[in-house]
Image (cartoon, rainbow, N blue to C red):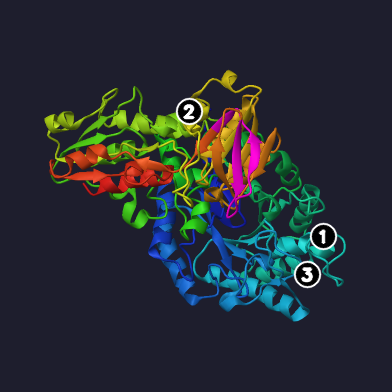
Amino acid sequence: MPLKLVWEPIKIGSVLVPNRIARAANSTTMFPNSVNDDFVAYHAARARSGVGLSILEAGSVHPNSQIAYLIDDNAMRGFEKLMAAVRPHGMRVFQQLWHGGHNLGGAGGAMPWAPSATPSALTGIIGVPMGQEDIDELVAAFAEAARKCRDAGLDGVELHAGHGYIVQQFLSPLTNRRDDGYNGGLLQRARFMMEVLRAIRAAVGPDFPVGARMGASTAKGGVGAQDIADLAAHLEAEGLIDFLDITFSDYFLMSGMAPTMAVPAGYQLPVNEKIAQAVRLPRLVTGRYRTLEEAEQVLRGGQADIVSLVRAQIADPELVRKTREGRVEDVRPCIACNQGCIAGLLQIGRMQCTVNPAAGYEATLDEALLTKAETAKKIMIIGGGPAGMEAARIAALRGHRVVLAEARKELGGMLQIARRAPHLHIFGDFLDWMQRQIFKLGVDVRLSLYAEVGDVLAENPDVLIIATGGMTVGDGRQAAIPGELPAGTALPHVYDPAGVVMMAESAFMGKRALVFDDTGRYDAIAAAETLLKAGAGVTFVTSLSSFAPKMLGSSRDAESLRRLNQGDFRLIVNHHLVSITSDHCLIRPVGTEKLERVEAGIVVLATAQVPVRGLFDELRGRVPDIHLIGDALSPRDLLAAVHDGHRCARRM
């Protein structure tokens, strides 16, 4: 689609935004109490590409709700540094003003404020109901934070009034149970929001853009799309906002805020179009958009004036520049796995990206910092999965002569299997991109080559990188009871998850399957969905205390469990696998000897893999420089594989 509208400038209040591509606020946790170099580099990389507007992640206006603070003068000095870095590139920068309400506690373990004593759907915390003095204090804090942002040189501010945080807690009948003037009809429940906006406007003056992020709840009885539409129209009529950032969902359905690859681009529009039609001021929408062509389509349809692409620009900070230059095929695709950008916040305490190891680490790992090696080396890489492919790409970018050997007839390793599983086809987009880049860089790719010691020594490489992956042993060994192997694992109807995904659906139709998960990763889910799609009934048994805990925070666990529960599916947690027979399995609760018989004509074992590192062990000491990466180092996941390959090759 020819791009036209995405390049048009737009005015928000007195500020001219150079184009219609934005980045809505996303948490990075690189901004604890002040803006650091990583935070500046992250935003500067997107500014250089040509993004029109970035809204900085939620900043708390009060210590009663603990997250990145806007009350610290160090943060303001950091903003001055940030603006100095992005201003030459034309990107406009707004700050999101936030208070989490009952979702997040305060500094020093203080209990957070809330409209009423209702539990958080995220944490279960019951906030402390706010008195009038508390409300007045928080209103003043929002205003003071906005003034500081203006004085620090930012271009505007956005009040976060969605996603179940403090403002939406006042707006929603589910969380606002007050018996004073802050409850009643919609405008009474919006009283707190309007007081905040009036105070912000008084603090920053008429020429500083002020907007609001608002969206409907997914919960029955919550604040709905028509409520948000009516309120937005009222706020516009009162002159309280200069733009509207329309979002969707809250912690009653967390996956609605940032869904995974199973959800299509533009998924929010059916709900948010009603809200967008209620106002005439600039409207920003989001919704898992990955390309500027998708954004152009939204703009042409009149459903919004600005389109946000957040995860797409985490995956490739140069998305705008590459698209403008006609290099769309070079854009590294976001696969919406949420494994690094969202789950990473919980798992390692900061944002990452599965497909872009430099995301969040641009100060040191930005590919713009790559330089040609002083001496071009011959680098041989054994294994053409994601770790080996990324190592080949980076080594080639550094000017080395790269040989990539793969035993199979195609590159991709486990990605070739994953892309065939239900709802995971998008993995193929990343694989296709990797292959394009490798061939474009002139990597010597040798397929169907099962490299042995002699093959490697004959090549005489300066550097050898082993990326031969991992493999399933198949003995059903369970991490918590490694000395108790289940009987029957060698029977012909026992598979690993990859085997199930690659088989014809007709092999499973009408049968009863047991999927046993001892890892908590996605491979067991992929097998279960494959079986259900093929017409089998599935009993999902896990030795862990919950369903797919390694997917926690990514929404992939919740989304897939909802899909599974729509079919012939049963979930059993906290059980070990004892034995397998031709038509059933025996399982027992963890820590007991109580046996339960489960019918199963098909059994899938998702257990820990072992690294395939024999070639590394044989060649260690026989080549000048040898490295082990990806699952061959330690079986983990796609993020680890890509990051291993990137960092290893970068050191060459």
Looking at the rendered structure, the secondary structure element under dot 3 is: loop
Q: Earlier in the sequence, mark 1 or mark 3?
A: 3
- The three-letter code of the residue at mark 1 reads Pro
Residue displayed at 35% across by 38% down: 469
Please tell me how crowded label 3 is: few (under 14), some (14-19), or many (20+) other residues with Cα within 10 Å.
Answer: many
Q: Are marks 1 and 2 in contact (CB under 8 Å)?
A: no
> Which of labels 1 and 2 is toward the front?
2
Residue 187 versus residue 375 in the image, above or below: below
Q: CA distance from mark 1 to mark 3?
A: 10 Å
Looking at the rendered structure, the secondary structure element under dot 2 is: helix
Q: CA distance from mark 2 to mark 3?
A: 52 Å
User: Residue 429: horizontal and vertical position, in percent?
Assistant: 46, 32
Q: Is residue 137 left or right of residue 647?
A: right
Quickly name the residue at label 2.
Answer: 499
User: Residue 132: horizontal and vertical position, in percent?
Assistant: 77, 78
Inspect this view and state whether residue 290 appears. no
Q: Earlier in the sequence, mark 2 or mark 3?
A: 3
Residue displayed at 15% across by 36% down: 461
Quickly name the residue at label 3.
Answer: 116
The residues colored magenta run 584-603
Q: Is residue 340 left or right of residue 12?
A: left
Quickly name the residue at label 1.
Answer: 173
Q: Is residue 239 left or right of residue 639?
A: right
Marking on residue 155 = none
Residue displayed at 84% across by 66% down: 183
Q: Is residue 450 left or right of residue 27?
A: left
Residue 187 versus residue 301 in the image, above or below: below
User: Residue 345: horizontal and vertical position, in percent?
Assistant: 50, 57
